[in-house]
Amino acid sequence: MAVFPYIVSGQMLDGAEHTAQLKLHGSETFEFKYTASTDEEFVEALQGFLTEHNFTDWSAYLMDGNVILQYDNYTSAEYVIASITIATGLTLTSQVSTDCPQQPKFKLKCGVIGFGICNIEKAQEFFKEDISFASFNPSTDIDSIPEFPVCWPAFAGTSQYQSDHCLYLRQMYCKDPVHPAINEWEVYIEDNVLVLPGMFAGQSPKWRDGAVLSAYLKGVTYRTKDGTQKPLYPAVEYCSQFFGGKGYLPSMAEQVEYFRNVTYGLAGVTRDKADAINRSLYAIGGDAIACNRSYLTSGRYSSIHAWSVSGNGYLDGRAFFGASLCAPLARIELPVDR
């Protein structure tokens, strides 16, 4: 996604003067005075406010009967901060909040709800190293299994980045918590493997169907400053170009289904000696699927974020559409002669 659009509502269209307050992308709070009898007049006043206060990364326009206030420079995770854009006297509703189902976290093999491992070999390769990132190397003492996997040096209490905060895990998984063995950490890592969505908590089958999820997002557009329409979810549009228009962005379950067995991308593994998928793609001259690359899915972590399978073997719930590679899928029906 290159933009972040809001639908504006609550404007008073009675020809009298009204005042709202707007704080846009962390700015100070400004008064917005407007007088309007139609949405067209309101949009003109709103665009005038943006120009007056030099909000060059913002635009206002009408689309499909809605007033849109749009941030035109949406390239990072700034909108995870709830207080960054606020309106008083008007209501801002994220246009990104489509009807596509959202699932913020999933169940792991050990029973914890969190960010699971989707390729165990790649995850063991990655998490064996000392990682400074606090999600994988706790900065405070833990008393439960974290939602993210913990790297081996943190688990063992030998990290160069943190003091020892993982005694709880060693007491759970190690015969001798003072002298942990790496094979005991590997058992812990295996406990962080994802339980595929749709297999617990009564989740709907549509969570497993990338074609259904892609249909929710296909055709949603935004307007650029030159007036052209562009897809809000370009990854979905990209995938739909393949297989005679039947291509789709896979669900997380579908993505994990094949990604979990991919070995190409592990240290020293060549395509012709890798997993069955890559050996087949290699034989027909197709592009590789590598476990050290991130692949986007059609599953939604939130209205803002998409799920992806990470190039480090675990799930990432903070990726944006367009921020990862896409591997389009399609279903084909083979004739059965009985």
Image (tube, rainbow, N blue to C red):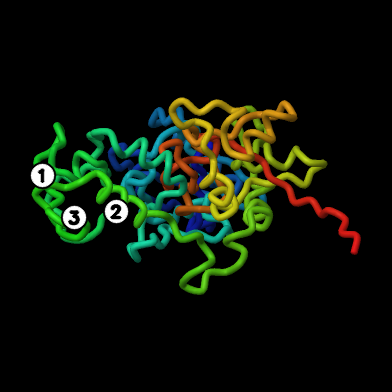
Neighbour class for label 1 at 10 Å: few (<14), some, many (≥20)? some
Earlier residue among tags 3 and 2: 3
Task: Point out which mark residue 174 bears.
Answer: 3
Task: Point out which mark residue 188 bears.
Answer: 2
Q: In this view of the protein, which residue sits in the foreground, 171 or 321?
A: 171
Q: Tell me, yes or no, if residue 59 can be seen here.
A: no
Q: In this view of the protein, which residue sits in the foreground, 116 or 247?
A: 116
Amino acid type at image mark 3: Cys
Position of 43 with respect to 138 (left or right) is: right
Q: Please state the horizontal and vertical placement of residue 194, each as a whole percent of the image.
A: 43, 56
Callouts 3 and 2 close, C-beta under 8 Å: no
Q: Residue at x 63, y 46 (%)?
A: 249
Callouts 3 and 1 close, C-beta under 8 Å: no
Task: Calculate the distance from the C-alpha at mark 3 to the C-alpha at mark 2.
Answer: 10 Å
Q: Residue at x 64, y 47 (%)?
A: 220
Position of 212 with respect to 193 (left or right) is: right
Would you name the residue on which mark 1 appears? 164
Neighbour class for label 3 at 10 Å: few (<14), some, many (≥20)? many
Q: Please state the horizontal and vertical placement of residue 314, each as a whole percent of the image.
A: 41, 45
Position of 10 with respect to 136 (left or right) is: right
